[in-house]
Amino acid sequence: MSKEIDVRWGWLKFMYIYTIVVAGGIGLGIIVVPKLIRSVFSLPNGDPITFGIAGSVYLSFGLLAILGLRAPLKYVPILLLQLSYKVVWFVGVLLPLLVAGRLPMYAIPIAILWATYVIGDLIAIPFSYVFAKRPDA
């Protein structure tokens, strides 16, 4: 790959740090103090297994994002996965609830938080690098 790629290094590192702090912090909170997290985000009581799975996933994103600080381009798939599942959630979950007029109030701050990730990931991810043809592929 002899062509120069356009990488916004500052944004890329910021998104890893943002993921470490917010996703990792919320994930750790869900696992360690789930009642506090439910209270802070005004979440209804639900299945503790499903809530724990979500916490485990968020904490895993935070932990893997630490590796992204060391090798930003190598760990871009973390940001891609984060971007894709949030977009799928917006289109497949939030939008139908909004159209049906059944969007719960607690979903609004979550949607705002997730929108910051979608926008940040769209800015940070070097798509020219991700979709570039490589001789080893």
Image (cartoon, grey):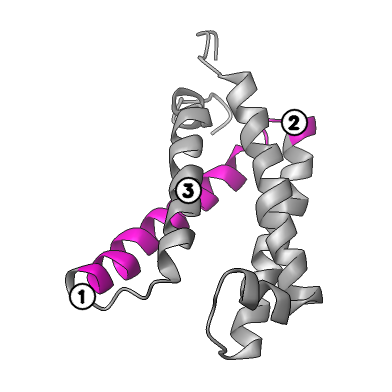
The quarter of the picture where the N terminus appears is top right
- Earlier-in-chain disc, 2 versus 1: 2
Where residue 52 sits, quadrant-wise, is bottom right
Residue 126, labelled with which disc? none
Q: Is residue 19 above or below residue 131?
A: below
Calculate the distance from the C-alpha at mark 3 to the C-alpha at mark 1.
25 Å
Residue 71, labelled with which disc? 2
* Callout 2 secondary element: loop
Q: Is residue 48 above or below residue 77?
A: below
Which kind of residue does numbered mark 1 sit on?
Gly
Residue drawn at (75%, 31%), measured in percent from left and top?
71
Calculate the distance from the C-alpha at mark 2 to the C-alpha at mark 3.
19 Å
Which kind of residue does numbered mark 2 sit on?
Ala
The residue stretch that appears in magenta = 69-98
Q: Is residue 35 above or below residue 92?
A: below
* Callout 1 secondary element: loop
